[in-house]
Amino acid sequence: MNIIVVGAGIAGLSTAWALTKRGHNVTLLEQGAIPNLLAASGDHHRIIRRAYAKGSGYGPLITEAYEAWDELWEDLGESHLDARGFLCISREEGDEAEQYLEGMRAGDFGVDFVEAVEAARRWPFLEPDTFRYAFFSKEGGALHCRRIASGMADWLRANGANVYEKSKVTAIHEEEGRVDLESGETLTADRIVVTAGAWVLKLFPQLGSDLTTYRTAVVYLRPPADLQTAWDSAPVVLDVGGNTDGYIIPPSGDGGLKFGSGLHKVETSDAEWNRDPVEGEGEAIRNLFAPPMARIAEYEVTDVVTCAYTFTKDERFTAAEFGKCLVVSACSGHGYKFGAAVGRRAADAVEGNGFEAFRHWLGGEI
Ligand SMILES: Cc1cc2nc3c(=O)[nH]c(=O)nc-3n(C[C@H](O)[C@H](O)[C@H](O)COP(=O)(O)OP(=O)(O)OC[C@H]3O[C@@H](n4cnc5c(N)ncnc54)[C@H](O)[C@@H]3O)c2cc1C
């Protein structure tokens, strides 16, 4: 089949990869560069971890996610996973970290439970009086997104796919299988896959009742000099407890120490709205992390990176079909880790092997 994929974030790159491997004639269209630094997949790194709340369905899917990444590493000839494990810190009864612990235990996925004093000894950037306990899993780490994107674009080109950067799609005619480009050109295909991330509502506004777009930002920090070594060898911190919805990626690959919080987001109708950081934004994000981090004011802001992403109401992933077009939205703030697996499953759906099954899988319902 001739297949057009619109958007070269991790979902589009992975779908193009899986379809190219199956012998299809694939054209991948990206409005920016690959990686596009404005896209959700465009930052240095994202976390992969098995921890999800009990019954969420996504925890068990991580096995497939890892298998798909392994298949990709084999094709790329190198791995872009820094498997440094993850750490969770509980500050309040029933907080997200505690829900993750219950999920890990329910799935019989091993964790090391660590008392607060011992945790602060092992990870001296923590303030021991400010949290209840920590737990650690060896399975988890950081995926190096920009290296993955560049590697996949090279692989696609080397394997016969057409990869076009700076090629913005302005309209999709789903019944005819045609796309219009900003350049004035049109392209036709047997099937179209749209993986446009936070821009999807520009092409399919009718999905606005299911999807909400937010503008967010993360902060890169230089820690106090005497804590640098501890950070260099630290696991990713999946949750810092309480209601902070805060995560941390230590220096890894080309990216430095990064803090991000789900509290720091604002709804927008435009993925490119307000993309320059505002004065004091980095410090505001940083300060959300004390407690449980010690000496937070000593962390120097080195960069603030804004981002846009889409959520469904229940923070799951979803897909829709319109004529010859399959629209995939696998974000809700946690989709990168499933990227390669989403691509393989989207390829199944494009080949006619069960759109409903794909949607259920995306929803974590398998
Ligand atoms: C701050 C933050 C932290 C996150 N942390 C994690 C994490 O730790 N772990 C995790 O698993 N997930 C995480 N996520 C979620 C993850 O980043 C997303 O699920 C994932 O990157 C989405 O990939 P995507 O390909 O669907 O979308 P995107 O990466 O947004 O890609 C969409 C692409 O489509 C292109 N495009 C859009 N419209 C057009 C058009 N009209 N024509 C051509 N091209 C177009 C865009 O330029 C873009 O490159 C996080 C997200 C954010 C924002």
Image: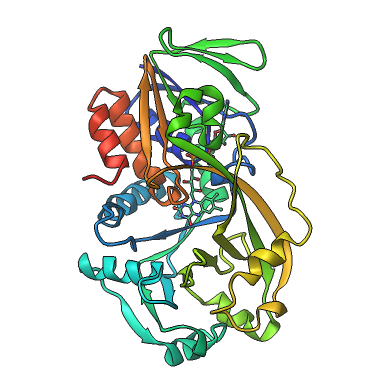
Q: Can residue 27 be spotted in the picture?
A: no
Quadrant position of the N terminus in the picture: top left
The structure residue drawn at horizontal position 57% and vertical position 77%, both measured from the top left corner, is 231
Q: Is residue 123 above or below residue 336?
A: below
* In this picture, residue 235 sits left or right of residue 53: right
Residue situated in front as seen by the camera: 41 or 273: 273
**Position above or below: 211 against 234:** above
> How far from the left and from the top, in percent, is residue 361?
27, 41
Residue 319 vs residue 242: left or right?
Answer: left
Looking at this view, is 17 or 234 the one in front?
234
* Residue at x 36% of width, y 40% of height: 342
- Residue 146, x across and y down, in percent: 57, 49
**Which colouring convention does the figure follow?**
rainbow
Indicate the quadrant containing the C terminus: top left, top right, bottom left or bottom right: top left
Q: Residue at x 53, y 28 (%)?
A: 201
The image shows residue 118 at horizontal and vertical percentages of: 43, 91
Residue 159 figure quarter: top left
Which quarter of the figure has residue 138?
bottom left
Q: Is residue 302 shown to the viewer in this render?
A: yes
The relative height of residue 271 versus residue 291 in the rendered view (above or below) is above
Query: Taking 349 as reference, is 44 above or below it?
Result: below
Count of numbered tags: 0
Q: Residue lying furthest top in this view?
A: 176
Q: Nearer the viewer, residue 35 or 202?
A: 202
Residue 198 placement (x, y as % from top left): 54, 37
Instruction: Name which residue lies at 68% across and 39% down.
Output: 273
Which residue occupies the extreme right position in the image? 279
